Image (tube, grey):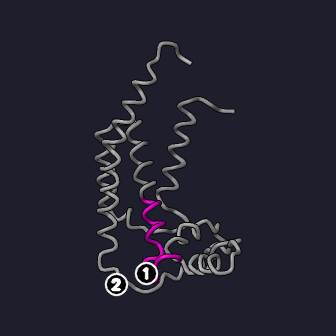
Amino acid sequence: MQTGTNWKGAITANRKEILLVLPILLSLVLFSFLMRYRGWRSAPLGDWDMLAYYLGADSMLHNGPIMEKGDLSSYQSYQPPGTVYLVLPAVAFLKDARLFTLPGDLLVNIAAMVFLYLIFRQAFGRGLALAICIVFGCTRLVFMGLWPIGHPAYALGMLWFLMQWIRKRSAW
């Protein structure tokens, strides 16, 4: 621990940056969601890949058991059942199956945007990080939806935690 470090000033500076950047990131996610869910009533009714998660959330609400496995992948192995927890609030409160992925999509895309900002802010500064988040928010990557594998939020989260681990040199 360094002596003479002004931690109160550093915390205040981080709080000011969070209060400045977080509304921008949230408005970008909101914009991307408005673009994705416009015309949602004309969307096809079901996503067959997510059917196991919809049924698992419905079973969890009415019967109580927790899913042990997700859907069967093309590699003939089962996906992890964690996506059911992201679908659960919408299955409980929304009646239209076309909106079942809405809360999970929102949460995962906010995480992707925040991790993207944190990674690029640490590497290149705040201005470029915000520019990259704006580009990411306007591309089709945000429209991926709630798919259990391959979403940028998972890869960006792992990369950010790896960068923190290397930067702090806290290897075991």
Q: Position of residue 95 (x, y in %)?
A: 46, 83
Residue neighbourhood size for the residue with mark 1, other residues' Cα within 10 Å, grouped as few (<14), some (14–19), many (≥20): some
The residue wearing badge 1 is: 98
Residue at the image position 42 percent from the left and 49 percent from the top = 114
> Any magenta on residue 93?
yes
Give the label on residue 41, or none: 2
Q: Residue at x 33, y 71 (%)?
A: 36
Q: Please, is residue 122 above or below residue 68 in the view?
A: above
Q: Identify the magenta region.
A: 92-109
Residue 120, quarter of the rendered image: top left
Q: Residue at x 57, y 36 (%)?
A: 165
Query: What percent of the width, then of the height, locates residue 139?
Result: 32, 61
Task: Determine the image quadrant of residue 70.
Answer: bottom right
Amino acid found under the numbered disc labelled 1:
Arg
In front of the other: 41 or 70: 41
Q: Is residue 75 left or right of residue 125?
A: right
Mark 2: secondary structure = helix
- Does the magenta segment cover residue 113? no
- The spot of residue 33 in percent (x, y) is 34, 66
| Disc assigned to residue 80 | none
Quote the CA–CA distance across marks 1 and 2. Answer: 8 Å
Task: Say which quarter of the image contains residue 58.
Answer: bottom right
Quarter of the image with the N terminus in it: top right
Disc 1 and disc 2 in contact, CB within 8 angstroms = yes
Q: Nearer the viewer, residue 99 or 42?
A: 99
Which is nearer the N-term, disc 1 or disc 2?
A: 2
